Structures are given as C-alpha cells and as structure tokens.
Image (cartoon, rainbow, N blue to C red):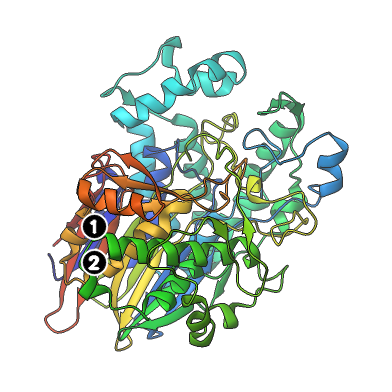
Amino acid sequence: MGTNGMVTSTHYLATMSGIQILLKGGNAIDAGAAVWLSLTVLEPWIVGPAGESPILVYSSDLGRVVAVNGQGTAPKGSTIDWFESHGYELIPPDGFLPAVVPGALDAWILALSNFGTMTFGQVAAPAIQLASRGFPITTNFARAIARSETRFREEWPSSAELYLPKGRLPHPGHIFINPDWARTFKRIVDAEEKERQSGRDVGLDAVRRYFYEGPVARAIVDFTSRFRCRDRYGQEHHGLLTTEDLAEYRGKIENTASVDYRGYTVHKCGPWTQGPVFLQQLRLLEGFDLKSMGHNSAQYLHTWIECAKLAYADREEYYADPDSADVPLDILLSKEYASERRKLVDQEVASMELRPGMREPRRLVKSSRGEDVLGTVHLDTADASGNLLSATPSGGWIPTSPIIPGLGFPLGTRGQMFHLDSSHPEKLVPGKRPSTTLTPSLVTLSDQPYLGFGTPGGDQQDQWNTQLFLNIVEFGMDLQEALDSPSVHTTHFPGSFWPHGASPGEVSVEERIPEEVRKELLAKGHKIIVSRGWSHGRCCAIRCDPENGVIYGAASPRTQTPYAVGW
C-alpha cells in the first residue's frame, strides 16, 4: 500500500526502475516507460526493443482512458504470394521472415509525448545503467540461454558472442552486461539532447527519428540484407523489412473498447489485440449468478469455460487489424448478441465445437499447438495525481531471431500471427498489423481510475485476467488474494501462434483446484490437464481507492521475479 505511487512488473529490478522515476518527480507514464526499457534488458528472451507494446493510460488531465497502439505493421514485401512461391504453408515462427516493423518504441514515445513529463534520457537512465554495469541473471534467464545454446553456437554468432560469454553458458547469478544495448540507447539519448533545447517534444521526435529513420533502422536493414537466417522449415532467407517500412511507420492513440460490468467500466485495446475477448466473456457471464455458484466450484468453472469458448470462437472468426478488416465490434460487444449466445451454454455438457456467432459451428480436430509460447512481460504504474497505466509488452525474443550486431537486440517475429489463407480475417497484407495476444486491462469506477492489471501468457492472458477480475468483483477478494488464487484455462480454440493448432475440450487446471472439482468437470466432458500448483501466468495489478487515496499493488509469486513496490 502507498499514497504517492505504485509500480508492479514481472521483474523486481524493473519495478525499482519505475520507482526511481517516481521518486525523481516523474509521473506514472514516465515510470512505465522506464520499466519497459529495463525489462528489455532484464528479460530479453520474452521482450525486446524491437517488439510491440499495447498500452492503456488513464490520464488525470483528460479524465478518461486511452489506448496506445504499439503493434508494428507487415513489410511491403511480405505478401501471401511471396510465401507461397517459396513453398510455405504457414509463416514460420522464427528467423527474419515473420519480422514486422518494431512498434514498441514508437508507442512509448507517443505515451511520453502526450501524457508524460520527462525526457527519454531521464526514463532510459535506469535501463542504460543495468545494461552497462550489469545485473545478476535469474534462473529463468539462464535456462532461456541454455535452451538456445546450440542455435547460438551453430547459426547465430552475434547471439553467441553476447549470451555465451567466453564461450560458456552463464549460470544464475552471473553478472550480465549488454554493452551494445547500452551504447545504442546512449546514442539515442545523445540525439535527443541535441534537439531538446527546442522543446521536450522535439527531443522525443529526435528519438523516434534516430530509431526509425536513422542509424538503428539502417543497422537493422543492413544486417538482415547481408545475413541469411534459417527458420523452422530449414529455409534460409534475408529479411523483408526495408528502411522505407521503418521510416513510414507510426503508432497511434485510440479510443478503448469497453463494457460495463456490475458498475465497473472495463477498458481494453481494440481487436488488433485479443482484448475484446475479455469484454465478450463479461457480457456472457453477466447473465449468470456466479457468486451463488461459489468460487472455483465445478458449476462456476464449467460456466466460465463454456463462455470463454464462445468468446474465443468469435476472436478466431472476426478479430483483425480494424484498419485493414471490417470487425463488427459493436455487435460482438452488445447485450443483445450476448443474450443469444448465452443460450448455447449447456450446464451439463462441454462443447466440442468451435461456435462463432453468425456462422455455422464446426467440429474441431486436435492438432499441435507447437512449443510453449516464449512469454511476455507486464507492468502497471500509478501516481498520486491519479494517472494509471497498464501495459503488456512483448516480442523481439532472443531465441527466435539473432542479435543485430552493434544494437544488442534482435527483431521480433509477430508476423507468425498472420495466415496465408486469403479468406481468413488475419490474412497477411502488406502494411497490416497482425493481431496480438497482448492485452493490458484498465478498469474505471464512477469515471475514476480503479484497477490496472495483466499477465504474460499468450492465448491464456485474457482467461487468467478475467478470473482475476471476477475474483475481486464477484467474490470480494483483495488484490493479492485474487491473483494468488488457482486458475484454469482452455486450449479448445485454434492458437494464435504457429502452427495455430487446437486442443478440443482441453482445460488446464492448477493442481490446487480440489480433486472433486476436477472429477465433476471430467464428468461434464472436459478433458482435464493438471498443471503445477503455481504455474498459470505472472499477474500484476494496481488498485486505486479514491476515498482515502491509498494505492494497492500486488504481484504474483509465480516464477518468483514479479514485484510490487509503493510508498
């Protein structure tokens, strides 16, 4: 608890970076940018500067919530014809071919310019210090490098040079330094300083130009034009990104998608994320008396799972970049639509079909969902002025693309979310944003900031997020209890990531869910997979109490590194 500010994130040192910024007079948006930058140094196997970042901001000046669209676009040369002519049935999950324009940095520059108070140099200082002076790597960091060791040694010498110091695997506690990352961002800060005398916004624009139009962009295109990168299919190709793709990219500030639930207004990013699927679940669930069912009872979990299946079926059928596709969001989020869809929930039998609205249902066939999603990070920040920020950055993973020499980070692979089927809403089109699973959440109460939260976890994010929210609103849990509570998720629907497989009827249940509940779910036809007791997500959350000015923070003990700090 605190009254001046609060920071949560998936790594304790990143949380401390945000606290440093608040203590120096920055606001929640400044602190959020510092946390993101630090996470790209601290957890590079799950987030990097060349990834993407959807951001939700409650601005006390505006008195409302806005979304910052930080999802990059497909290169002009990335077409269905190109992939088909080279023998691809799916876009690979690794290499240079699934790279889209990095959207994250532009998103944070937009957020700082419109809602922050500090310079880029100020918010980047903690991350530059971490990269240049070093920090002890965690067990998860060491394991991530070990999993990629062979590829680093045999295929990616630039990655081996950085992550296998002196040719050896680092161990937990090894002091890791990323000098190229530090030099890159020191040079970006220098570019800002040269222009800052003309104003903070001019300096921030110099940052984006250095990255998207200057030396960083040229280094990206030069490396991907010279180096042929092998992918999952054994093919080797140069990259498709050009300097023009990078120079023309712009993120944007948008209205949120939102619904009211029991007096709370829940805000999400648009259908370029999976965010509206959270809102669709709430629309369906508001027609049930969840509280009387009992928390994590078989009846409650069955109802929740069946509603999740319906919402995710619509995600599969309709969601895409709304600038490039007609997404009927008004219909999908309407009470009338939910009322009709709710009739499909059979309280005794688990559905084995994919049942999108306004379409014929289709039987699902079990197919591989590939390897575990590499992961993501999450952060929330709040300040005493009433600003609240929630962001779920990801992409630019070191296991899926080689380090760009001189920059200290790789490209992203979010383009794997596209489909090469021209009838699919997520069909590949140059300049289109791939829909992302990244999905921060922000809740207002009586038009005031109330709750910011989120978690890593791919397709599971807005399943765990929904349960966290219901734990608070329906079952009266405090923040820590709500995110500590055992959870479930389903993989019934096609996955967002390569190879887009489905597991009809499968439900993963943390082993802390009682055995008798699991047996009742089995009896209803669910295919139960028992997960480790503390393995679902890394939820972080902040709650603001407008009555007494107290700000509450909480972070999941799952994976050990998330942390909340306030004062």
Label 2 crowd (10 A; few <14 / some 14-19 / many >=20):
many
Counting the numbered discs, the total is 2
Q: Amino acid at mark 1?
A: Leu
Q: Are marks 1 and 2 in contact (CB under 8 Å)?
A: yes
Residue 11 % position (x, y): 29, 44
- Displayed quadrant of residue 142: top left
The mark nearer the N terminus, 1 or 2, is 2
Name the residue located 50 percent from the left edge and 70 percent from the top edge.
Answer: 276
Q: Amino acid at mark 2?
A: Asn
Name the residue located 42 percent from the left edge and 20 percent from the top edge.
Answer: 146
Label 1 crowd (10 A; few <14 / some 14-19 / many >=20):
many
**Residue under numbered circle 1:** 483
Position of residue 146 in the picture relative to residue 359 (left or right):
left
Residue 112 is at least partly visible in this image = no
Which one is nearer the viewer's eye here, 315 or 297? 297
**Residue under numbered circle 2:** 471
Residue 553 is at least partly visible in this image = yes
Which one is nearer the viewer's eye here, 386 or 375? 375
